[in-house]
Image (tube, grey):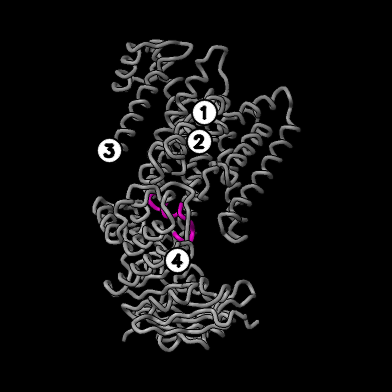
């Protein structure tokens, strides 16, 4: 399988404090790859290094073989779209105006979005079942609705790569599954390479075919879920006793072990 | 979209009516006949001809340059305010956030102190020092992280520096000759505007507004935040520099021509947002239209109210603040201004 997104040897430090060290992995077409790790393990920083909002000190990111480091923002934005963590706006844009902004990188220098761009944005919203929210103010939407609108914006950006930063962190039980259902469905339908950071290993087990596990800024484990999602890895990474349970026809589930933390 | 067209049409009519009224009203009252006469004289290229009747001369050499200047400055301050509010993602930002108004006021005060009442010296110095102040603030901000916060802080620093400079010059100034001119200038007025001032202002402000109009779309993603704008494909540092340069130049030119008129650049963008929403596609031209109209009405009131002319900067706040409060309260009933 040819990998669409290739991350090799990424290292990053804030001032003199090293945050990431020698991270390498790849994500293939039609794959949802989960990025797991405890707080402060460097997940969000890694995501920012990949999309170039931060410049990594070492290593490189390639998309389809071409190096991202030297590319102008416009070109990067045609290759990867980002669904940011929960955001609220200082000014009131409608949901549709938010989605239309996904076109920014494809508009000519001084061009405005056309009526066609707008109707395509509506179609992208309808595809995720949020078409009826088009004229609502983004700030008035619920957390789940906002996340779906931001996902619609990312898909409207029409990039081969999709990055999501904790898309479920502010969502209720139902909406966590709803958003990830849509993400994995779109990844398969459009053949995207999707990288998603998650707090909950059970969500990762359910939706990600591949996992990358970080600990203290280093790559702890990577590979297909079947090999990575096991008691030893999760115990080491989260620093607590856990047990992995397998039920027929269901992805494996991790539960807190005897309840006693190791540390 | 249809609402937008209606809002633009109505505002344009209000502006046109305000222009006609402003040309007619004043100590020397004119009627439609005089207006027609001057129009004919402009078309036939005889404007300013001393052989023309007195009313036409008043209209041509006193009121017309003043009316144009008021519309131009109102549009410049409002558009600049809208641009800076998006850039700093903060509805409380005014065009002076990076120190352009305090720098320009310092420049004018300095010229009044050193060179006396030379119009060219005052305008040139105001424009120059306005740009110096923002360049200073921008450089400090860039060296301290190039974030929105560091820019705001360096703007505060630079404003404080130039405000102290103004105080020092006022303290040293001749209290009978120089001080009144300085005080009057810092309050802002179109009282002494002649064609030369208007033309100098137009030469800078018109292209500035035109370029900002062409670049208005990027303000949408930039209003979402630096990182988000970057992932959407905007080169944020470059775009920010373009907007700061243009927004600063048009405000410096405004302050140079009529002094420091506060409140318009802060409030008119909000009025525009309340009426049309935050999409800069419509917001930028609408803020220009609304700002020009607002400033013209204020200036016309400032010179026609009984009791002699008052500085328009006083009036913009005196009448603008209650009007803004009214908009805020009525808009809250419709769901709040941020929604």
Give whichever of A244, A77 is nearer the camera.
Answer: A244
Residue indicated by mark 2: B267
Residue indicated by mark 4: A168
- Helix, strand or loop at mark 4: loop
Q: Position of residue A240 (x, y in %)?
A: 58, 81
Q: Is residue B117 left or right of residue A246?
A: right
The crowding category of the residue bearing disc 4, from other C-alpha atoms within 10 Å (few below 14, some 14 to 19, many at least 20), is many
Residue A21 visible from this viewpoint: no
Residue that appears at 41% across and 74% down: A195
Residue indicated by mark 1: B320
Image depth: mark 1 or mark 4 in front: 4
For residue A8, above or below residue B8: below
Q: Do the residues bearing badges 1 and 4 touch, measured as CB atoms within 8 Å?
A: no
Q: Do the residues bearing badges 2 and 4 touch, measured as CB atoms within 8 Å?
A: no
User: Does residue B72 belong to the magenta stretch?
Assistant: no
Residue that appears at 24% across and 53% down: A116
Closer to the chain start, of discs 1 and 2, is 2
Magenta stretch prevailing secondary structure: helix
- Helix, strand or loop at mark 1: helix
Stretch in magenta: B216-228
């Amino acid at each position: 399988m040819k990998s669409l997104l290739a991350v090799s040897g990424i290292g990053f430090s804030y001032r003199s404090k090293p945050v990431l060290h020698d991270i390498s992995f790849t994500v293939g077409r039609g794959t949802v790859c989960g990025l797991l790790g405890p707080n402060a393990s460097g997940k969000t920083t890694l995501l920012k290094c990949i999309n170039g909002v931060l410049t990594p000190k070492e290593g490189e990111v390639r998309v389809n073989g071409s190096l991202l480091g030297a590319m102008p923002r416009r070109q990067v934005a045609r290759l990867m779209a980002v669904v940011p963590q929960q955001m609220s706006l200082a000014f009131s844009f409608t949901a549709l105006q938010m989605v239309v902004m996904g076109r920014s990188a494809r508009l000519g220098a001084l061009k405005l979005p056309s009526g066609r761009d707008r109707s395509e944005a509506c179609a992208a919203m309808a595809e995720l079942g949020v078409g009826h929210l088009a004229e609502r103010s983004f700030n008035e939407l619920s957390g789940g609705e906002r996340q779906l609108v931001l996902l619609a914006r990312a898909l409207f950006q029409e990039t081969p790569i999709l990055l999501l930063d904790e898309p479920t962190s502010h969502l209720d039980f139902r909406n966590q599954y709803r958003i990830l259902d849509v993400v994995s469905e779109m990844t398969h339908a459009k053949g995207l390479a999707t990288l998603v950071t998650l707090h909950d290993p059970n969500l990762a087990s359910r939706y990600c075919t591949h996992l990358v596990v970080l600990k203290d800024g280093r790559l702890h484990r990577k590979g297909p879920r079947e090999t990575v999602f096991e008691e030893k890895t999760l115990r080491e990474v989260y620093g607590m006793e856990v047990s992995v349970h397998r039920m027929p026809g269901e992805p494996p589930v991790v539960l807190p072990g005897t309840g006693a933390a190791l540390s | 979209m249809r609402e937008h067209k209606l809002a633009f049409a109505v505002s344009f009519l209000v502006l046109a009516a305000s222009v006609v009224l402003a040309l007619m009203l004043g100590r020397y009252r004119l009627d439609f006949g005089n207006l027609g006469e001057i129009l004919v004289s402009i078309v036939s290229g005889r404007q300013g001809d001393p052989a023309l009747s007195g009313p036409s001369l008043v209209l041509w050499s006193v009121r017309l340059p003043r009316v144009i200047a008021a519309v131009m400055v109102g549009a410049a301050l409002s558009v600049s305010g809208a641009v800076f509010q998006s850039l700093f993602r903060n509805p409380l930002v005014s065009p002076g956030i990076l120190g352009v108004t305090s720098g320009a006021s310092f420049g004018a005060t300095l010229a009044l102190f050193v060179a006396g009442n030379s119009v060219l010296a005052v305008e040139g110095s105001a424009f120059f020092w306005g740009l110096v102040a923002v360049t200073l603030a921008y450089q400090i901000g860039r060296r301290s992280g190039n974030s929105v916060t560091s820019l705001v802080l360096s703007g505060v620093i630079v404003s404080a520096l130039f405000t102290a400079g103004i105080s020092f010059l006022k303290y040293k100034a001749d209290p009978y000759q120089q001080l009144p001119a300085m005080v009057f200038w810092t309050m802002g007025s179109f009282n002494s505007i002649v064609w030369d001032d208007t033309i100098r202002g137009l030469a800078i402000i018109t292209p500035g507004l035109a370029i900002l109009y062409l670049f208005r779309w990027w303000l949408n993603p930039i209003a979402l935040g630096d990182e988000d704008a970057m992932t959407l494909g905007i080169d944020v540092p470059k775009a920010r520099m373009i907007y700061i340069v243009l927004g600063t130049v048009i405000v410096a030119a405004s302050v140079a021509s009529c002094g420091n008129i506060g409140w318009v650049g802060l409030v008119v963008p909000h009025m525009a947002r309340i009426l049309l929403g935050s999409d800069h596609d419509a917001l930028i031209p609408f803020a220009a239209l609304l700002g020009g109209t607002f400033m013209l009405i204020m200036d016309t009131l400032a010179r026609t109210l009984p009791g002699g002319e008052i500085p328009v900067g006083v009036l913009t706040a005196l009448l603008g603040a209650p009007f803004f409060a009214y908009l805020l309260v009525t808009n809250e009933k419709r769901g709040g201004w941020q929604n």
